[in-house]
Image (spheres, rainbow, N blue to C red):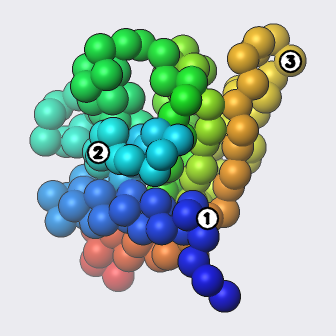
C-alpha cells in the first residue's frame, strides 16, 4: 500500500519525537504544515530542558509557526503530532484556529481530542477542525512504551 501524505508527515513528527527521547523528554513530536505540504515548524517536548510545564511539542510548534508567519491564526495549516493532545494543547489548537489536526497514538490518560475529552468537537466551540487520529499509531505507541520502559528500568 502506498504511503499517504499524512503518514509521510507523521514520520517527520516521529523524527522530532525521537529527538525528545534522546534528550530524556517524553517523546512527543509535532510539525505544522501548510496546504502546499511545506513544513512551517517542527518541535518536540522540551519541558524538562526548559523547566516549563507548558513546553509541549504542540505549543512549541504553534509558537514557532506564529512567529515565522507573523500571525496568530493558522487556519490554513495542519498540525501533526505523535500523541493525542492534552487539554492545554487542545486549547492552544483551538485558539490558533488550526484547520486540521492529525495525531498518532490516542492518550486514554489525558487525551483531549477523542479519548478522555472531546474539546475540539464540543458544541460550544465555533470553529470546526478536521481531526484524524491513529496515523502510524503503532510506531507512536512503541516509542512512548520504550521510553517509559527505559525510565522504569524494565
Query: In this figure, which residue is indicated by the disc labeled 3?
Result: 123
* Residue 93 percent coordinates (x, y): 54, 26
Quarter-wise, where is residue 101 in the image? top right
- The image's mark for residue 135 is 1
SS at circle 2: strand
Disc 1 to disc 3, C-alpha distance: 25 Å
* Residue 139 percent coordinates (x, y): 49, 75
Contact between labelled residues 2 and 3, with CB atoms less than 8 Å apart: no
Nearest to the observer: residue 93 or residue 107: 93
Question: Quadrant location of the N terminus?
Answer: bottom right
Quarter-wise, where is residue 47 in the image? top left
Q: Earlier in the sequence, mark 2 or mark 1?
A: 2
Contact between labelled residues 3 and 1, with CB atoms less than 8 Å apart: no
- The image's mark for residue 43 is 2
Quarter-wise, where is residue 135 in the image? bottom right
* Residue 25 percent coordinates (x, y): 25, 53
Q: Earlier in the sequence, mark 3 or mark 2?
A: 2
Relative to 86, say whether 139 is above or below. below
Mark yes or no: residue 17 visible.
no
Amino acid at each position: 500500500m502506498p504511503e499517504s501524505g499524512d503518514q509521510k508527515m507523521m514520520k517527520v513528527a516521529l523524527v522530532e519525537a525521537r529527538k525528545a527521547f534522546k534528550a530524556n523528554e517524553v517523546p512527543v513530536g509535532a510539525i505544522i504544515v501548510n496546504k502546499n505540504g511545506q513544513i512551517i515548524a517542527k518541535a518536540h517536548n522540551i519541558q524538562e530542558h526548559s523547566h516549563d510545564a507548558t513546553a509541549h511539542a504542540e505549543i512549541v510548534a504553534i509558537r514557532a509557526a506564529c512567529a515565522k508567519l507573523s500571525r496568530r491564526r493558522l487556519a490554513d495549516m495542519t498540525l501533526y503530532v505523535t500523541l493525542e493532545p492534552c487539554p492545554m494543547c487542545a486549547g492552544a489548537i483551538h485558539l490558533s484556529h488550526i484547520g486540521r489536526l492529525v495525531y498518532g497514538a490516542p492518550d486514554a490518560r489525558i487525551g483531549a481530542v477523542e479519548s478522555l475529552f472531546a474539546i475540539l468537537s464540543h458544541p460550544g466551540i465555533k470553529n470546526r477542525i478536521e481531526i484524524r487520529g491513529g496515523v502510524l499509531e503503532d510506531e507512536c505507541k512503541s516509542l512512548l512504551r520504550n521510553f517509559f520502559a527505559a525510565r522504569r528500568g524494565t
